[in-house]
Each structure stands twice: as C-alpha cells, then as structure tokens.
Amino acid sequence: MASNSALESTIDKILKNTEQDILANIKSGLDDSQQNLDAAVPKLESEYDKIISDGKKEADKIEKQITGSADIEARNKQLMALEEAVDKVFSKLLDQVANADRSGDYSNLIKTLIDEATKILGTSEIIISTNVKDKDIVQSALSQFSGAELSSDTIDCLGGIKVKSKDGAMTFDNTIDARIERMKPLIRKEIAAKFGVGN
C-alpha cells in the first residue's frame, strides 16, 4: 500500500507539473498573441486611415470631373446661345443693308470705300466692280478719283465695291459683305466679353 501511495504521489506531481507547463505555455501563447495584436492595431489603424484618405481623394477627383463636365456643358450652351444671337443680329443687319436707301449717306459711304481701297492698294489706277443697285452711285463717285474706272461687269453682293489695280496684280474686296465678315470676329468677341462668355 505504501508503494501505491508513492506511485499516486508521483503521478500527482507529474500531473501538477504538466498542468503548470501547459498553463505556462497557454499564458505565454496568450501573452504573445496579445503583443502581436497590440502591435497590429496601429498598423491596421494606419491602413484604415489610408483607405479612407484614398477614398476621399477618389471622391474629390470624381466630383471635380463631374463639376468640370457640367461647367464645359454650360459653357458650350452659352457659346451656342451667343452664336445664335450674333447670327440673328447679322441676319437682321444684312436684311437692312439689302433694303437700304441708296442716297445721301450711302453715296458718301461709297466714296469712303473707294478712297480706302486706293490707299490700301497704293494706287488710284483701279477698276471698280459693284452690284447692279450701286452702279449709278459708284459711277457718280468716280468723278472724284482720277485713274479709276467702273467695270462693265457687275458682282453679286449687298453693296460696296471690289477693286483691282489696272495691271491686275492687286485686288481688294471692300464690299459690305466682306466688311461684315471681317467685323464678325471682333463683334463676337465684344459680345462674349460683355456677357462673360468664353473667358
């Protein structure tokens, strides 16, 4: 019986030591896990912050693209409205010019157009072409410009003149049509600036 009790005592000691070893290993493993978890938290927080930051940047980028696209669309609509308005103004102007009275001020305009053309070409030795409506007015204005003559051929235009040097080397289109076309970009720019379009 004494040997049984010694055996039981030895088994109890071994079980107690083994239990203590297992508990020590579990505690050590738990401590290691806690340390690993504690070490991982800042890294996870940093990753979380980075994901949030990247998400905000992407959202800002998409917002800017949407806003930019809307701004471009609005600007294009403004430009189209401006273009329509300018076209209406020019259409009305052309209609008024086509039906204008060909006396008094118009006669002075023709003289100015001829004078301007001779200065630009640098010669008064010119042949002038005009439309059927303006032929008589141009003919009467020629008396003030020696070396200038009226072509027998007429041109298709609202009014004004086309001039070429008698040697045929130089020409200048000073018709009302051409003058309006030359003014269009300037008028468009002025209207656009006035209404803040296209800046």
Image (spheres, rainbow, N blue to C red):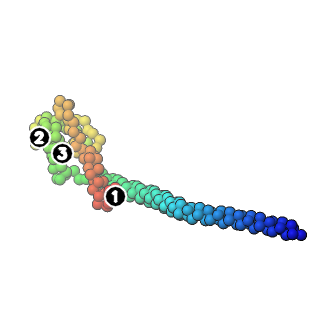
Q: Earlier in the sequence, mark 1 or mark 3?
A: 3
Q: Is residue 25 above or below residue 173?
A: below
Residue on which the image places disc 3? 113
* Label 1 crowd (10 A; few <14 / some 14-19 / many >=20): some
Residue 10: image x %, image y %?
Answer: 80, 66
SS assignment at label 3? helix
- 18 displayed left or right of 75: right
Task: Report the disc number at residue 145.
Answer: 2
Image position of 196 (left or right of 116)? right
For this rendering, which residue is in front, 60 or 74?
60
Going from N to C along the chain, the mark reached first, 3 or 2, is: 3
Does the residue at mark 3 contact the one at mark 2 (Cβ under 8 Å)? no
Between circles 3 and 2, the one closer to the viewer is: 3
The residue labelled by disc 1 is 197
Q: Residue at x 10, y 42 (%)?
A: 144
Label 1 to label 3: alpha-carbon separation:
34 Å
Instruction: Give the mark toward the camera: 1 or 2.
Output: 1
Q: Quadrant of the C terminus?
A: bottom left
Observer-nearest of 188 and 119: 188
Q: Nearer the viewer, residue 2 or 173?
A: 2
Residue 83 position (above or below residue 155): below
